[in-house]
Amino acid sequence: AQTVTQSQPEMSVQEAETVTLSCTYDTSESDYYLFWYKQPPSRQMILVIRQEAYKQQNATENRFSVNFQKAAKSFSLKISDSQLGDAAMYFCALKGGGSNYKLTFGKGTLLTVNP
Amino acid sequence: EAQVTQNPRYLITVTGKKLTVTCSQNMNHEYMSWYRQDPGLGLRQIYYSMNVEVTDKGDVPEGYKVSRKEKRNFPLILESPSPNQTSLYFCASKRDREGYSEAFFGQGTRLTVV
């Protein structure tokens, strides 16, 4: 069974500052993929960034980057130069290498950005 | 525009009254799936479909049915809704079984069963 744990139910950051959201996971598979999704008040699920487990290099997408620690099974999201529009619920998700494309989600971290 | 469309976006119904939430994607994706989102629990998979006429249970299938008669459509059916099915529902589609390809989500359906 796969599990994803987000230990921070809520986080806050000042505008223009940097914040890191934590995620740990567990899987018995050697081939898997990790994702961070953003859910703003509109409820839309938006893919922020993704990482293939076999790649050692950390993924980056503009102001968003991850710190992928495979041995520790950790996949944290760093948001640099935080903007008011970054305020949302953030979900960490894991997909194993099987044929079911199921994403296993964490419980989410609600990020508040203070002006 | 590539999208996954769910209808309705909001629904209030009474216990036991059958309902269907529709989901349609215009990307010719093979994989489609339904999730429910509950506070403090994240999203959990209800059912998934790998192609037309191929469906299987996810983690929380009890009380739900699905069908996949056409590639683009994947309706979620609640034969006899109960209050514990009050939730936010998401349909998602994905191009193929490759793990890296992006899953596209619908706008969500807020269901309340009274």
Image: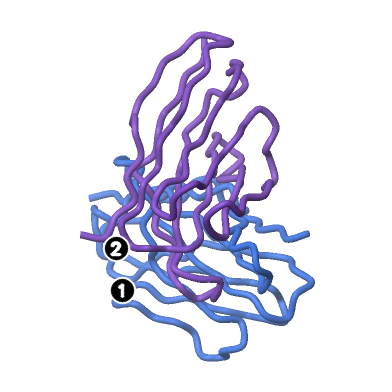
The residue where tag 2 is placed is: A82
Does residue B15 appear in this view? yes
The quadrant of the image that shows the N terminus of chain B is bottom left
Q: Position of residue A84 (x, y in %)?
A: 24, 53
Is A93 in front, or is B5?
B5
- Chain under disc 2: A
Crowd tier of the residue under label 2, counting other residues whose Cα lies within 10 Å: few below 14, some 14–19, many 20 or above: many
Q: Position of residue A40 (x, y in %)?
A: 33, 47
Task: Determine the CA span between mark 1 and mark 2.
Answer: 8 Å
Mark 2: amino acid: Ser
Quick check: A104 above or below B59?
below
- Chain under disc 1: A
Quick check: A25 above or below B75?
below
Q: Considering the numbered disc 1 on the image, is that residue within a helix, a strand or a loop?
A: loop
User: Which residue is painted at 64% across and 72% down in the image?
Assistant: A74
Answer whether labels 1 and 2 touch (C-beta < 8 Å).
yes
Label 1 or label 2, whichever lies nearer to me, is 1
User: Which residue is painted at 56% across and 10% down in the image?
Assistant: B15
Is A114 in front, or is A104?
A104
Chain for colour blue:
A
- Quadrant in which residue A29 is drawn: bottom right
User: Which residue is painted at 65% across and 68% down in the image?
Assistant: A99
Mark 1: amino acid: Arg
Q: Position of residue B43 (x, y in %)?
A: 56, 45
Q: Which mark is residue A47?
A: none
Quick check: B56 above or below B77?
below
Crowd tier of the residue under label 1, counting other residues whose Cα lies within 10 Å: few below 14, some 14–19, many 20 or above: few
Q: A3 left or right of B36? A: right
The residue where tag 1 is placed is: A63
Write down the colour of chain B.
purple
Sequence-first disc among 1 and 2: 1
Q: Position of residue A55 (x, y in %)?
A: 56, 89
